[in-house]
Image (cartoon, helix red, strand yellow):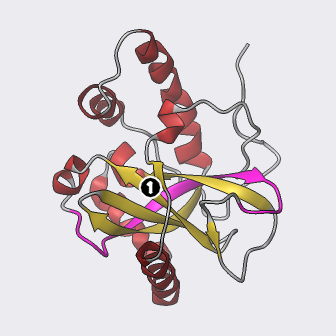
Amino acid sequence: MEINYVDPNTAAENAGNVLPSREKFDYIRDEMLHVKGFKRVYFNKQFKRLGGYLMNGDTQPAVVVSVSPLIISAYSDEMDGVLFLKFPDALADMYGLSVGARLVTSNIYIPGNKPVKDVYAGPYYMGNYCDFTPTVQLFMCDGEDSIRNRTALFGEDVWKRVEEMSFSRFSQKHKTRDGFQLMTKFRLLLLIF
């Protein structure tokens, strides 16, 4: 029996429409996360699930707030908020990232009306979701130039808001999440876009 991780009754405003790269997925598994043994079997099963999230997830802006350690602030317009993702520092060199670099994520959402503690929601929070899980498209997909060009989906007013919110929250006490949590942590929750 196959479990569907995507609610077919919902649709993202800006669906990702990108596919995961098996080569990048395997590199992260072997060289960054050093997954071995039984965990490798579980990890490999996440490739298909990740593909659904990247294809159907809500494309949203993200900004690099630190390169050592590598921390990316991911935004959600649904929550008018950010959360911080920590990645291996080697990715900053690999992709030529610097503080302030603009990226895009594919976000999935969890229903609820009160944000979890590490989501810093803003005044335009709609109250439909309690959490979101972003996947940085650049780290997981081929076609890097076209993925970098997707930052143009958002106007300068959006980028200004994301940057102000990200750097303001980052300068305060903040929590970070594992940037690869979709592949390393399994949730039996209904995830919605």
| Residue ID at (77%, 39%) | 190
Looking at the picture, tell me which residue is in the foreground, 177 or 110. 177
Quarter holding residue 167: bottom left
What's the residue at 81%, 68% (across, down)?
Answer: 127
Quarter of the image that includes the N terminus: top right
* Residue pointed to by mark 1: 85
User: Residue 80 in the image: x percent, y percent?
Assistant: 65, 75
Per the image, is 89 magenta? no
The percent coordinates of residue 181 (x first, y second) are: 50, 40
Region of the chain picked out in magenta, as a range: 97-115
Establish if 15 lies above or below 73.
above
Residue 112 in the magenta stretch? The answer is: yes
Which residue is drawn at the image coordinates 44% and 73% (left, top)? 170
Q: Is residue 186 visible?
A: yes
**Residue 76, x across and y down, in percent:** 60, 67
Whether residue 141 is visible, yes or no, is no
Q: Left of 149 or right of it: where is 1?
A: right
Residue 192 lies, in percent from the top left, at 73, 48
Which amino acid type corresponds to the residue marked 1 in the rendered image? Answer: Leu
Q: Indicate the secondary structure of the residue bearing disc 1.
A: strand
Please give left or right for residue 75 compared with residue 113 in the image. Answer: left
In the image, residue 13 sits, relative to residue 171, either above or below, namely above
Residue 184 in the figure: left or right of residue 88: right
Query: Farthest residue in the top direction?
Result: 37
Which residue is at 47% across, 82% downward?
Answer: 168
Q: Quadrant of residue 77?
A: bottom right
User: Within 10 Å of the Cα at label 1, are there few (<14), some (14-19), or many (20+) other Cα atoms?
Assistant: many
Picture mark count: 1
